[in-house]
Image (cartoon, helix red, strand yellow):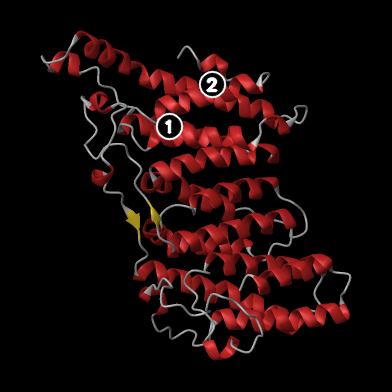
Amino acid sequence: MSVLPGIDLNDMKKTSVTLDFLNTILMNIICVDCSSAVHNRNDLTDIEKQVCLSTGQFNDFINELLNRIFHLIDILSADIYDSDALDATIQTKFSSILFSIVHQSSDDIFRLIQEKMMFFVTGSCLSPQVRSIVSCLVQGLVKGNPMETLKYFLPKTCESIINIKSIDEKEDIELNWYLSLFVELVRARGDILVNYKSMILSVFHHSIHIKNKKTYEILANATTYLLQSLCQVYAIDYRLTTDNINELSFRAWGHSVDFDQLQVQFHRPNDQEIDFAWEFIDTFLYPELTLLNDKGLTISNNERLRSLTIIESIAIGCARMVSCIPNESVQDLGVHSSVPYRSKYQTQFPIYSRDRSETKENLRMRLLTDMEKLLDRLLENHSDDVLSINKTLNVKVNN
């Protein structure tokens, strides 16, 4: 409590040091009110009793911490203030602190954070310059407790997006605000996201054709994160202890853990997640490829760039699950390498290669072929559209 005044927008160095201190402490403790142990246990030392009684202030501490962060964001959202004052490093520290609290806290403390965050992010539409800060806070919640966070935030966020009727060419600040929240929510575990499949798809159906550059760039980020969440392998459990959180949790504070006993849990995509990913690709990638093949030279530069941005984001997101181009298709490319294209040590994921009735073609080859044709046509007819040419090259090279 005594260091919270160090979060001061007028002194970024002091704020950074304060956040480092809080982050270090909160990574090593479990946020749970253990004060009842004083009355229920007779094996506590005097120091343990003092610690137990002090944990009764966790709610007040977290409430005050969030109030100070929200106040800082409110000030930054004012047009008269320099929004660049809060750099990416400090934003990351906010996310880390919230994650450290959430992933090892009692249900009561998590609900407090959840309710205050929900009231803050949905109570008003903040200016664009603070989106990244709030996104970092939501990211900490999603990473720490994805199941409860999505249950609490995703339906409201999707409903808010769908209810906004946006004009294609103009930026809708409210829409972009909710889409920024949506981006962080779809970074949750894939096995949880599949439960909200219809909601997620409805958001993309509503927004994917909007031609405002800021809007489709935000949506492209959501596309990449969604597909990566569905089809990649990643750690999902970062707790310091595998013990249940209870009134004696303070005894685990700062203890070292045997590496062999960590039992880290990993997300491994299941059939439902892979099916969801392929459905998303079939629904949103192929229409964009068709659009560029049929009308790539007649649509506006901005519409062409929008389509290519969406294609690139899908290609990046599903790169792990798309099979390599068959050897015979690439053996004559003239590229010499000490590393063979096909290696017996190459990681294989059988679940990705299941037979699909929707598409029999090699998606990587399809992207390579279509982008090569589009690039030739752009160079011949729209050589001044540098952005689209660069984006086409990016898609082609990355595949």
Q: Quadrant of the C terminus?
A: bottom right
Would you call the spot at circle 2 few (<14 residues within 10 Å), some (14-19), or many (20 or more)? some
Q: Nearer the viewer, residue 178 or 101?
A: 101
Where disc 1 sits, the SS reads helix
Q: Residue furthest front?
A: 338
Q: Is residue 294 above or below residue 13?
A: below
Q: Which residue type does callout 2 highlight?
A: Thr
Q: Which residue type does callout 1 highlight?
A: Ile
* Image spot of residue 375 (x, y percent): 77, 78
Is residue 295 something that shows in the picture? yes
Which label belongs to residue 121? Answer: none
Residue at x 64% of width, y 54% of height: 218
Q: Nearer the viewer, residue 1 or 242?
A: 242
Would you call the spot at circle 1 few (<14 residues within 10 Å), some (14-19), or many (20 or more)? many
Q: Which residue is mark 1?
A: 113
* Image spot of residue 390 (x, y percent): 76, 67
Is residue 165 something that shows in the picture? no
Q: Is residue 244 above or below residue 294?
A: above
Q: Viewed as shown, does residue 385 lie left or right of 8?
A: right
* Image spot of residue 70 (x, y percent): 57, 27
Residue at x 62% of width, y 41% of height: 132
Q: Viewed as shown, does residue 167 lie left or right of 348?
A: right
Which label belongs to residue 18? Answer: 2
Where disc 2 sits, the SS reads helix
Give the label, 2 or 1, closer to the camera.
2
